[in-house]
Structure formats: C-alpha cells, structure tokens
Image (cartoon, helix red, strand yellow):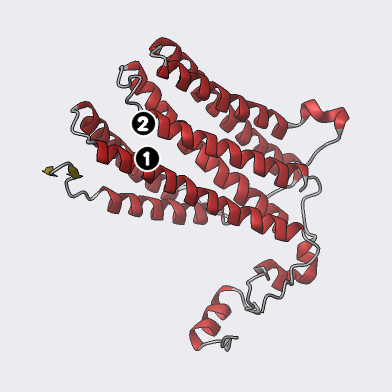
Amino acid sequence: MSTEGSYYVPEQSKLPLAAALGMGVMAFGAGSWVIEGGTSTVFLIGTLIMAMVMYKWWSIVIQENTQGIVSDQLKHSYVLGMYWFIFSELMFFCLLFWIVILRQSTSWSLDWR
Amino acid sequence: MFDDTATDAAIANATHLWNGYDATWPPLVTPDQTVNGDVAKFIGPQEAMSFPGWSQIFGWLPLWNTIVLISSSGTVHVAHHALKEGNRKKFVQWLGLTVALGVIFLFLQAEEYVHAYQELGLTLESGIYGTTFFLLTGFHGAHVTLGTIMLLIAFLRGLKGHFNEADHFGFEAAAWYWHFVDVIWIGLFIIVYVLG
C-alpha cells in the first residue's frame, strides 16, 4: 500500500479477475441448470468462487477501514462508485422492463429503420 | 441505412443454434416464434400471477411480497436514523429486522416459484410470458439476495461496533442498494403483476 500525497493508491489485486471468473462460471452454470435435464453443479462451483472472493474482498476493505488508512479522497470515491453502480443497475432493469412493455404491446414488429 | 447481408459466420451460427431463425433488426423475433410462429406471442401459462380480483386480494402472494419489501425499506431507514443519532443498539435491532424481512421476501419468492411450476404451469417453457416472467423476477431475486448479504455484513459489523455517527458508508451503501432493489420491485410489481 502506498500513499502519494493525500491520494490513496491501493495495492494491486487479483480479486476483480477472480470475481469476473466467478460471475462467468455462475452465469454459465445458471444457464445450463435451467435447460431441460441440467444440473446445478457448475452454478454451485461459481457460487463458491464468488463466496470466497466476497469474503476476501470484504475482509480487506474492513481492515483498511478499521486501521484508519482510508482517506477522504478514497471515501468520496466509494460514494461515487456506489452512485454509478446503482445507476448502471437501474439501466439494466430499464432494459428488462422495456422487454416486458414490448411484449405487452400489440405488435412485436416495430420498424425502426 | 446499414448492410444487413448475413455473413457466413452468421449463417453458420443460425444453422447451429436456431435453424430457420430469421435474423432481423431490431431482434424482436424470439426463437420460439420461429418454431410456433405468431402463436408464440400468445403461448402462456393457463394461469398467471396477475391481480386475482379484490375478493382474493389477501391470498395474492406478490402483494405480500410488496408489503414485506416496502416495510424493509422503512426499517432500514429507521436503522440509519438511529445510527446517525448514535443509538447503536436501536441501529442493530432495526437492521436485524431488515435482514429478516429480506430473508422472508426470498422465502416467499421461492414459494411463488414452486406454486408457478407445480400449480399454474408457469415455467421457463411457457412462451414469451414464462421466459420474461422468470427473467425479471429471477434477476430481481438475485439482487435481493445480494442486498440481503450486504445488509447482513453491515449487521455483523454493527454488532462489532464498526460504525459510528459520522463514519458508516459500508452500511449506507448497502442501504442505498436496498432502496434501489425496493424501487425496482415496485416497478416490477406494477408491470409484471398488475398490468401483466
């Protein structure tokens, strides 16, 4: 962990990579689970990877917080990060709602060209 | 406007995945429409989860889910206020209640899926209605699960006395997320259950 002035530069981490892997395995596993005759094994492996990532990630963040090495700048970045995370989630659900509203409309053949 | 001639790769994909699938833009023809034609738009379960009429309103599970989730948004708000006032005991109690309501919601949702599959014939195979129903409620349920885990971690940290009046973003972020999940449910309740 290094500190450049008041700007917090965290240590390099392999956790985002592991999280991406875990999410990918979970998504693939969920897909193959709901297909007729599929099993939940791959999904559960993905869940296990995610559980380990979340445990580790939370441990690190909580340690940083209790040690008091969290600067104001980092706190602000957490707030902004959460704003944009929730905004992107909102957009994701807008997409899903759009699908349903399209389905409910009388015709599927909207010609946008 | 743009070149929509199918490439060799696209043709190979179409043959492997959905034979006879007519790729159009916007992609509004679903694979089961290529099999069942326009009928696919109307294939649905014998019964849906929609509004059952005022006489059966209290037996309507989605309504109970709505009540549980809106209440949990209220309890997390009370917990937040208690923490800002420095009342940690009240904070932990109301946050614990919120986590419990989250778990109850998930339990009711699992119950609803069992009901849908076993009694209504509403499955992933029941046309566009079935797939969109499970797509929306499933993704929302996954978000409730994550939100509940986040609040549970905040609860455990609250028990350990990690938060104080000024410094509690770990909890606040989870609370924001929880309100977001609640807002999405209200949209989902209206679009899927009331209008659907």
Q: Which residue is mark 2?
A: B169
Q: Are marks 1 and 2 on the same chain?
A: no
Q: CA distance from mark 1 to mark 2?
A: 8 Å
Residue B124 visible at all: no
Q: Residue at x 33, y 49 (%)?
A: A19
Q: Nearer the viewer, residue B12 or A96?
A: A96
Q: Which mark is on residue A96?
A: none
Question: What percent of the width, then of the height, locates residue B53?
Answer: 86, 35
- Taking A3 as reference, is B28 above or below it? below
Left or right: A12 as drawn, with respect to A40:
left
Name the image quarter holding the N terminus of chain B.
bottom right
Circles 1 and 2: CB distance less than 8 Å? yes
Left or right: B40 as drawn, with respect to B25:
right
Question: What percent of the width, then of the height, locates residue B165?
Answer: 35, 19
Q: Which residue is mark 1?
A: A79
Q: Residue at x 35, y 16 (%)?
A: B159
Q: Quadrant of residue A108?
A: bottom right
Residue A104 visible at all: yes
Residue type at mark 2? Phe
The answer for which chain carries disc 1 is A
Extreme-front residue of the structure: A5
Q: Secondary structure at mark 1?
A: helix
> In the rendered picture of this protein, how many numbered marks are placed on residues?
2
Residue type at mark 1? Val
Question: What percent of the width, then of the height, locates residue A51?
Answer: 35, 39
Query: Quick one: label 1, few (<14), some, or many (20+) residues within 10 Å?
Result: some
- Taking A56 as reference, is B136 above or below it? below
